Image (cartoon, rainbow, N blue to C red):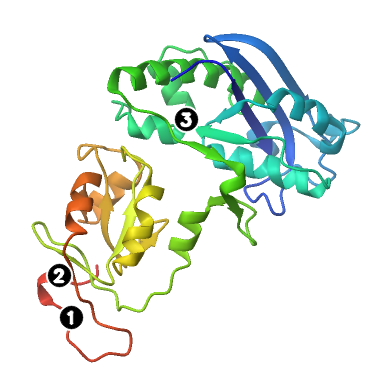
Amino acid sequence: MGTDGWVVVDVETSGMRPAVDRVLSVAAVVIDDDEVVHEFTTLLNPGVDPGPVHVHGLTPALLAGKPRFADVAGELAAVLQGRTVVAHNATFDASFLAAEARRAGLEPPLERYLCTLALAGRLHLSTTDLKLATLADHFGVEQRAAHDSHDDALVLAGVFAGLRGVARDKGVEPTVREIGAMLTHEDTGFLVSRAWAEALAAPRPWRPAGRLRRGGTLMQGMEVVFTQDVGRDPDEIVPLLVEKGLYVADRISSRTSLAVCDAPGAVRGRAAFARKKGLELVPYARLEELLADVRPGRPVGGGAPVDEAQGSLF
């Protein structure tokens, strides 16, 4: 994994939906060989209520008179051009930057991005969660002002150096998303990969098949959720899941049949919630094996009985 061409980015926003909420501040920290070589940071006047001031501290008075996104878009794009944007929960930052660019009639200022949250999940770290503050403490990086975009970007630069070191030791290559291969969700404004979007929107011709039992087989109509602790990119396998008659979901619900997890001892996030609900945690490699033999399900509107061996929904 090379160290050239990285720029760590953090944004503070007025809310959680890129389609309607706005960027209040943006910081971009260019790193080379783990050294900060250039910084860009600015507050922005969003032209709307700044939202949860108690979280980010950015009051209307503080933002009044600051530039609009369109005013700094050119300078920001110059910093990001040709570099891979690194962010924690990077889809969030990338989606907001892309949404602001669209409002200004411009192309997104970034070409590709890498998510440190996803990378940290693939490394199976011994942390209670994968929050930036937790990872900063794990790697000995000082955090001075949480939810300040400039400080968060500097902290993430240090965390990213630590993650790259672990990734090298474990032979893990991080996933880089190309903006050109992403779609924009009409309602939320979030970027989503084409493979994932198509899997989520795929028809569901089979009735819910219940939970996967330990030692059992997959059945058409089973719903699969991926945890953060997955060693490979789910995009590589979701088209095959759909082809086999399985469903993909973003979150665990009463219809979820199994959770994909490469760290069965994980005590955080979806893995912990899946265990609490009594769901099977299936390693990625095991899921590939199970896909070789998927049993027929019950079509929607059909009268065939559900296989009792698969259990029932919780």
- Distance CA(mark 2)–CA(mark 1): 8 Å
Q: Which secondary structure lies at badge 1?
A: loop
Q: Which secondary structure lies at badge 2?
A: helix
Q: Position of residue 36 (x, y in %)?
A: 61, 10
> Disc 2 designates what residue?
310
Closest to the observer, 164 or 137: 164
Placement of the N terminus among the 4 image quadrants: top left
Q: Amino acid at mark 1?
A: Val
Q: Amino acid at mark 3?
A: Thr
> Disc 3 designates what residue?
116
Sequence-first disc among 2 and 3 = 3
Task: Note whether 205 is above or below 1 in the view shown.
Answer: below
Q: Position of residue 238 (x, y in %)?
A: 37, 56
From the viewer's perspective, tell me whether residue 196 is left or right of residue 215. Answer: right
Q: Position of residue 235 (x, y in %)?
A: 41, 49
Task: Note whether 167 is above or below 214 in the view shown.
Answer: above
Q: Amino acid at mark 2?
A: Gln
Q: From this viewpoint, is residue 52 visible? A: no
Closest to the observer, 272 or 195: 195
Asked if disc 2 and disc 1 are in contact, CB closer than 8 Å, the reply is: yes
Mark 1 neighbour density, 10 Å: few (under 14) some (14–19) many (20 or more): some
Task: Note whether 304 is above or below 261 in the view shown.
Answer: below
Q: Determine the residue positioned at 81% across, 41% down.
A: 46
- Distance CA(mark 2)–CA(mark 3): 36 Å
Mark 3 neighbour density, 10 Å: few (under 14) some (14–19) many (20 or more): many
Q: From this viewpoint, is residue 1 visible? A: yes
From the viewer's perspective, tell me whether residue 161 is left or right of residue 107. Answer: left
> Disc 1 designates what residue?
306
Closest to the observer, 167 or 213: 167
Mark 2 neighbour density, 10 Å: few (under 14) some (14–19) many (20 or more): some
Q: Determine the residue positioned at 42% across, 30% down.
A: 174
From the viewer's perspective, tell me whether residue 116 is left or right of residue 10. Answer: left
